[in-house]
Image (spheres, rainbow, N blue to C red):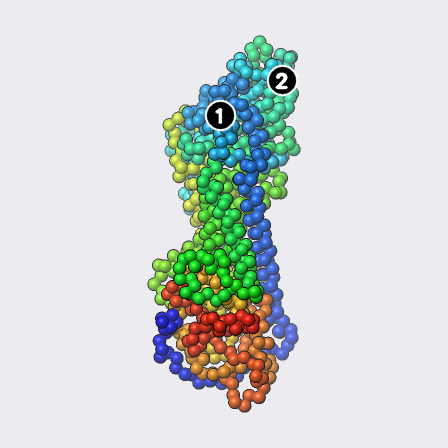
Amino acid sequence: MMGAILGNKAGDHSSIGPTTETPRALPTSKTSMVSKTMVPIHFARLSKILTSCLGAFGAFLVIVDVSLNNWEINHFLGNAQYFITPVANLPSLHVIKSHYAFPNEASPEDLSEVSEFMMNHSISTATDHDGSHYLITAGSYAILDAANDICGDLVHTYPMENVTESIPGTIRLATVSDKLEYVRGNLFEYMFGAADTRPAPANATHAVLTDLGYTPTRMDCDMRLTTPIEVPEDSGGVVLINTSMFRVYAKSLCTACTPIVEFGHDICELKLTYNATAQIMTVLSSKAHIGGVHTVGLMFQRTAASVASLVLRVLCVLFAIFGYIASQKTIHWCDPTALSTWYKRVICTLSPPIYRYSSYAFSFSSFCLNSDWFVFGYVIAVLLDEKQSMIYSKIMFTWNEHGDSSWIPIQLFAIEFRWLWLNCAIVKLFKFVLNFVSMTRYTGKNLLVGLCNFSSGFYIYLGAVVLFDRTKMIQGINHDMVSLSSSTEPLDGLRVDVFNGYYMRTVPDILFIMTINLMVVLTIDHLVHFRWWQRVAKSSLGRQTMFNSTSILNEMRCDFYHIDGYKNQAVKIQARTLCTMQWFFMCHTLCFGLPEDPKHIRALLSHSAKSDRLTVRLLSKSIEMPHADLLKLNDSNHSTRNLSVRPKKSDDTDDAPSYDSIQICILVQDSDGNIRLYDSRRSELIGLGVEVKIFNNGKFILG
């Protein structure tokens, strides 16, 4: 059993004579010491502070996302009900026609069958209050120029004889139109210069557009409605008035699919004339007030997926909070028999047995970024709600692009920050797949698996920078867009395929960008910290995290130490921290169960055989000191202490009885993925052997 776990044979522990290597002297210049040791430590501290700040900002964005980008809360508040004011008692287009004056060229009679269905569905759903849809607010945006001015659509001639229901002396104006949006090109065509650049002629038909490479991607039906306007008494005179204009903008991402509805409200300044004889009102000009505000609402389906997404996100946040609190205490060393069944493992994950001693093994951000349960749970929640969040963020981004709101970008960051965990999930999946398809027998041999690791949370956040431009990337991919109006060609019979929808068509491009971005960030991380990664791979603790589990974050809570005569890298770690880390890796990540390479076992046994008891000397001192005083943990995650190790001689009079023996241990996994700790005598450390270290706040030296 022992040989199978460690991956070596019983005859591999041949004795090697003691080393006679003379310890190297440390530099005597204080300036030299500062330049060689203090600067890296300060740099590491600065990196840690920066990572902590980014983690705090990330936690803030999650709170904003769960609270403000919460469809249930937004809908419950009911602030968006204002947008249904003009149609509150008008459940269909047929009824609206008798209350509003439509121009001949923009009336319900000109709509296609699908567009009429979309508008009727939107109006009836908004007024029914049956709980099947969310009706939410999506922000207010300053009108700083013509880009956010949509009042111009009211410039038409309105015959009034068809209006049978109106307040005496007033008239309500309305327009409605539909169009089919076409898009061509994708990221790969733009990258390789293969995109069709032929311009689409004005009033091009469906046949012409498809010949040019365009594909139908969205059906739109846009209706504008004003509040009652007083009919001028002076026939033929030009009158200047202000009126409220409401917008009902239905969009469908596939033919006859349930539409998403954008609502809007503006104050428009109209210049109009009235012909009493012909019963015609003509709007000569219509514009919004520069400096005014355009308010936006949104209505989309309340599905089981969207509700489940919200519940799952809240549960994930609670899971992370309680899991992090547990990780701040020392958790009992996990006996494999205590995790023999799935329900025992779940109980240990949610409510582990703890000591009262603190461990501080993980920061909150590292816990959330590295736990399989949290990462994949949050990713599932994000994907369940991705359609709604994409639409919501796209509308907010489009309106704020020409606005001046400082809060809207934060809300957008919070939505786009969700994909940070999609990044983590992709790396974890890559790591699992690369290990699964590999023929590697021992941990530490698969270099591609080792590449799927981050040295700190800073690089994970760096990989999320591209995600903050996700909405802009979608618009960039779909920038070559033209419209086909029903006034140019009847839209009945033209199909929008769901896979050619405005958002769906960009998914391969976005995933490609995410993958390349992750590869670049991981490569930068491993190049910048190349020597550090080499040292991590030489320690058994590092090999378990890098090569033998789905852990992707290697924030080592220990220091590296060079021991003369030992071929691999030794690290010193508090027993309390090691116990909590073992619980995390066994309960929050998937362990691969690869054994250690026999050469690492031979190195450990060879070093153990040549010294029964080892003492440690500080290289710059001539006297020996207790290694508990020498091997202090410093603040740097990437620091190394040089130690001279020699056999204890019978005439060593400087050794006090309190001096500890240095015993190098090794972390391994059995075939079931259970993490075990063995000493250099091949004895497993469990129970009392580990508890003594915990009670005394002792430390392990891991080879």
Q: Can I make out residue 216 in this image?
A: no
Residue in the picture at 53% in, 34% down? 135
In the image, residue 52 sits, relative to residue 680, either above or below, namely above
> Where, by quadrant of the figure, is residue 345 drawn?
bottom left
The disc placed on residue 28 is none
Q: At label 2, which amino acid type do we have?
A: Glu
As drawn, the label of residue 177 is 1
Q: Secondary structure at mark 1?
A: strand
Q: Residue at x 58, y 30 (%)?
A: 82
- The residue closer to the viewer here, 500 or 363, is 363
User: Relative to residue 103, is residue 504 depicted above or below?
Assistant: below
Name the quadrant of the N terminus.
Answer: bottom left
Q: Viewed as shown, does residue 12 lie left or right of 377?
A: left
Residue that extends furthest to the left in the rendered view of this protein: 439
Q: Position of residue 111 (x, y in %)?
A: 45, 23
| In the image, farthest residue toward the bottom | 651
Tell me which label, 2 or 1, sits earlier in the chain: 1
Q: Note whether 598 is above or below 519 in the view shown.
A: below
Q: Looking at the picture, how far across and down is residue 699, in whole percent?
A: 53, 72
Q: Residues within 10 Å of mark 1 (few under 14, many from 20)?
A: many
Amino acid at circle 1 = Ser
The disc placed on residue 230 is 2
CA neighbours of label 2 inside 10 A, class few (<14), some (14 to 19), many (20+): some
> SS at mark 2?
strand
Whole-percent x, y for residue 105 in the image: 49, 20
